Image (cartoon, rainbow, N blue to C red):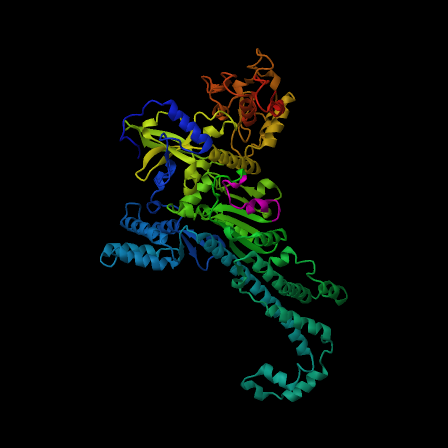
Amino acid sequence: MLERQNSREPGTPNTAAARQAEVAFYLTGRCPGNELEPVAERGLRPALLARYRDLSSLRYDYPVVLVGNSDPEHCVRPLSGLIDQALAAVAHGADDRISQHVLRLERQLRVAAADGGSRPLSELWAETAATMGAGEDAELKDSLDKAWGAMPADGEVADCDDRLPERLAAHVWLAVQEDKARRLRREIARLVHRVSEILRADLARSEQGRSAEMLEASVGGLDAEAFDFGALSRVLVRTANRTTLTGDRRGRLERIIAALEAYDFDPAALRFDSCRTALEAWRDRFPVLTGVARAIAMAELEIAGDYREERHDVFFEDYGADGLSPDDLALFADGLVCVNAATMDAAEQAALMEILSAGLPMKVLVQTDDVLGETRPGTAPRGFGRSAPHFAHMALGLNDVYALQAAASHLPACKDRVADGMTYPGAALFSVFSGATESAADLPPYLVAAAAVDARAFPVFAFDPSAGDTWASRFSLDGNPQPDGDWPEHELAYEDRDRRRVTERLAFTYVDFAALDARYARHLARVPEARWDTEMVSVAEALARPPGSDPEPVPGIFMVDREDRLQKVLVDERLLREARRCREAWHALQEQGGIHNSHAERLLAEARASGTITVAEAGGIAGQDGADGRAVIVAGEPVSAAGEGAEPTAEIDVADTPDPGAELSEDDPYIETPRCTTCNECTQINDKMFAYNENRQAYIADPDAGTYAQLVEAAESCQVSIIHPGKPRNPDEPGLDALIERAEAFL
């Protein structure tokens, strides 16, 4: 249980000087006087991460076992999953002796794996068992031996560290390419055999094939003495079929066999650490692949007896001149390129884009170890904050490149998508954040990587061009926590001064993620406990306000020190601005994933403004096909995603709906309160302007308690478009022309 510091007396009244210091810090990032304290060297981390201080005590997806000689779908297995499978075969519940012994061993295996290295599970298991005393404890040895006997697989153990993305990608890639090489090897062997049969059959019909020497060689053994092969040859030659192969065809068949037999199946030669090197190797390799693909196509025609020299000679002369077809390329092993974003110069990035835009059969892993930029004073606004290259986003625009963006923490859960990308017949890009950030070195990479996903700093998404004909079938945001919200929310439990348990629901934001990085300490300031009575709003609440609004109260986050004591930490305006930029980028990604689609919302508003709308149309326009999962409220009646409980063709006249603003001036703002879905969007923007009635439905409590900009923002963010901002009440409010234009859709 987290503790709130209680070594001091309850907080003292907030002084004007202290309040001024907080506002000054928010605006400038400086701590004047002694009212606030820097967070550097305090070992603070976001409060929501307090429970993850010791990862070895938790059962999660790491370490993983890279299983050898396995199919791509099963070549990456979480250690915990393998152990559970073994225990299911030999143990009898969690309280069973074998289960207790093996789970103790599993914890020690996690500790051993965290030390790094590449070691087989069998070796690590035996060593850890010996360390636990299996040599002296007969029961322990028996338990561990039985469990190992039921272990379904062995392989290299890999923890979540800076080497993991490349190790995992290379392992899956090799499994896919070895499977592809086996299939091509079988196919080439079949073709060589069938083409060789044509040559052998022709030889058997020729005078050479019916010579005494050839006949004797074909019989062999002791029985050869019983025949007069010279006499037999003379008879057969007189009756030989003279329709042998032409010289041109014989030469063509021999060239086909030579080209097929010369192909090298070793995919290990196709692994590169540079896009430029891979591109040069491809240019050298392409003529070889063209020759083999040509030989395969010619062999199929020859075997079927369909080769026509007058037609096909010209065709095959220029075969591959304009590139090979996807079907041809799919026959051969794909290259693998593993690069680090930090070392990619302009030439390397250009080579990467050439690989992707040309659709070359290469799988490219771009590993990023740092998704946050420097925070040096004086940097340009766009030079602050996120620094991760957005190669996966750029790949989306090419439309035929498989793209996967994921943090290393999520790779085990995304292993099927990794396998899909490795088997995709074309170029594939894997953009992976390792979490091994030098400026967050006191935290395990797994935790940093997972925090980046939660904070929307490095969201998970996948684009598979082969998954269907529509964007919805190709693009997925699966893997992101609570994808329909701005930020994922989690419960935080702690004890207050009076030792009472307090539970709060906190959002994990971009600011929480940045707080993990030592470079960002200057943008945070600790509030002394004696001043905890001061007002502090959450970052999520502060971000709900429009930019440029009154900074009071100052936004902040909860953090914990090394003793897990709760701390209040304020955030400056520049870091909050960067968090807002991150949220906007996430909103754009949500739209691509079919969540809170602004086009759909606009169409719905236009349909309502026209006077009539059907329930089915409302559900369709709002995108209620499962992407968001929220109900649509039309004329006071909830409609589920499937339209349950309503007639899909029933028309509802919006004009017949009781209008809460009927007695108001047309210039006044109002909400269609009976249709409110209690989404909290408006109250998060301004809880003085917007409030809930006894039915938990929103109304405008005080239109003068906020700005027109907040009214417009609330109207735009409302899920069911029931907020009407009216006309501006303050003619001097900045940016009114743009705000009035935005508000027209809701008037």
714 horizontally vs 113: left or right: right
Q: State which quadrant residue 331 falls in.
A: bottom right
Between 51 and 185, the one nearer to me in the picture: 51
Residue 669 makes an appearance in the image: yes
Q: State which quadrant residue 255 falls in.
A: bottom right
Quadrant of the rendering where the C terminus is positioned: top right
Magenta-drawn stretch contains 223? no
Estimate the x, y position of residue 702 in percent, counting from the top left.
50, 16
Between 464 and 297, the one nearer to me in the picture: 464
92 horizontally vs 429: left or right: left
Between 62 and 273, the one nearer to me in the picture: 273
Residue 71 makes an appearance in the image: no
Please name the residue shown 33% across and 33% down the image. Answer: 566
Estimate the x, y position of residue 394 in percent, counting from the top left.
59, 45
Magenta-drawn stretch contains 388? yes
Estimate the x, y position of residue 232 in percent, counting from the top left.
66, 86
Quadrant of the rendering where the N terminus is positioned: top left
Between 9 and 427, the one nearer to me in the picture: 9
Q: Is residue 157 above or below residue 618?
A: below
Magenta stretch?
382-400
Q: In this view, does 480 lie above or below 609?
A: below
